[in-house]
């Protein structure tokens, strides 16, 4: 990056470098999509647990949103056009109970990431099926991935299969391996050693409550 338009520079969080390519970052292998067995499920602290088959899911209302990707490995990719089902639409369908404050994203093959319900309710959060007008490639999470632009990209699960609504905030896969519980790129919330005391207490409390319940 030698010379950057200031309007563009303003959109790049600290410590990030722009890329035009789209790297693939997966822990493990790309799962195979079987439309006859695929479902998307919402469970936990909701008034109405729901499961959509692929035929049902692909008919849900969609919107198009343009947003930026910021990966914790320090690349950012601006101006991605995503088409998908608004996360807020899904949340409205299942009606979270008042005590539900957190959502665990569950994805294939065995990936999880934890997010607050508030972060998922923003207008630009999608269960995306298309990127720049084309079906999402399998390596990038096709048929359906989350896109949560205001957090580092590990908070956007590829091959998304379920939302679990919770009253505690247990760490997901990368969060158990030292990544930050919240992941705001503008605050450079990269690793758990940067977490606040409040965040660390939340980790400990969630682990304890889940242990007590089982
Ligand atoms: N299911 C699943 N989702 C995932 C991952 C993964 O390994 N498995 N990696 C995460 C990470 S660390 C990043 S940076 C982005 C990468 O998405 P991309 O491969 O489309 O660039 O997906 C996130 N979602
Ligand atoms: Mo990542």
Image: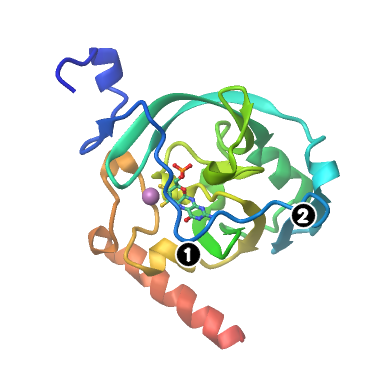
How many labels sit on residues? 2
Residue 90 lies in quadrant: top right
- How many other residues sit within 10 Å of disc 2, few (<14), some (14-19) or many (≥20)? some
Q: Residue at x 39, y 59 (%)?
A: 181
Mark seen at residue 5: none
Label 2: state its secondary structure.
strand
- Whether 15 is drawn above or below 196: the answer is above
Label 1: state its secondary structure.
loop
Q: Percent position (x, y) of residue 8? A: 30, 18
- How many other residues sit within 10 Å of disc 1, few (<14), some (14-19) or many (≥20)? some
Circles 2 and 1 in contact, beta carbons < 8 Å: no
| Colour convention | rainbow
Q: Residue at x 27, y 41 (%)?
A: 74
Residue 1 appears left or right of 150: left
* Quadrant of the drawing holding the C terminus: bottom right
Q: Percent position (x, y) of residue 144? A: 65, 43
Q: Percent position (x, y) of residue 28? A: 48, 61
Q: Residue at x 64, y 60 (%)?
A: 165
Residue 98 lies in quadrant: bottom right
The residue at which mark 1 appears reads as 172
The residue at which mark 2 appears reads as 39
CA–CA distance in space, label 2 to label 1: 21 Å
Q: Residue at x 44, y 59 (%)?
A: 27
Looking at the rendered image, the disc whose residue lies closer to the viewer, 2 or 1, is 2
* Whether residue 99 can be seen here: no
Q: Percent position (x, y) of residue 117? A: 57, 51
Mark 2 or mark 1, earlier in chain = 2
């Amino acid at each position: 990056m030698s010379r950057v338009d200031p309007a563009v520079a303003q959109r790049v969080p600290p410590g990030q470098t722009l890329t035009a390519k789209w790297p693939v970052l997966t822990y493990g292998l790309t799962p195979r999509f079987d439309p006859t067995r695929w479902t998307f499920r919402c469970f936990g602290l909701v008034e109405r647990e729901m499961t959509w088959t692929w035929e049902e899911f692909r008919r849900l209302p969609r919107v198009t949103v343009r947003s930026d990707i910021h990966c914790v490995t320090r690349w950012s990719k601006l101006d991605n056009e995503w088409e998908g089902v608004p996360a807020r639409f899904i949340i409205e369908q299942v009606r979270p109970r008042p005590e539900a404050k957190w959502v665990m994203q569950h994805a294939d093959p065995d990936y999880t990431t934890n997010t607050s319900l508030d972060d998922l309710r923003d207008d630009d959060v999608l269960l995306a099926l298309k990127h720049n007008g084309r079906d999402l490639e399998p390596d990038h999470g096709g048929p359906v991935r989350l896109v949560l632009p205001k957090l580092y990209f590990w908070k956007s699960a590829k091959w998304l299969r379920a939302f679990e609504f919770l009253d505690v905030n247990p760490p997901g896969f990368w969060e158990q391996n030292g990544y930050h519980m919240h992941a705001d790129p503008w605050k450079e919330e990269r690793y758990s050693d940067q977490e606040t005391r409040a965040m660390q207490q939340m980790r400990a409390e969630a682990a304890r409550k889940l242990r007590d319940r089982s």
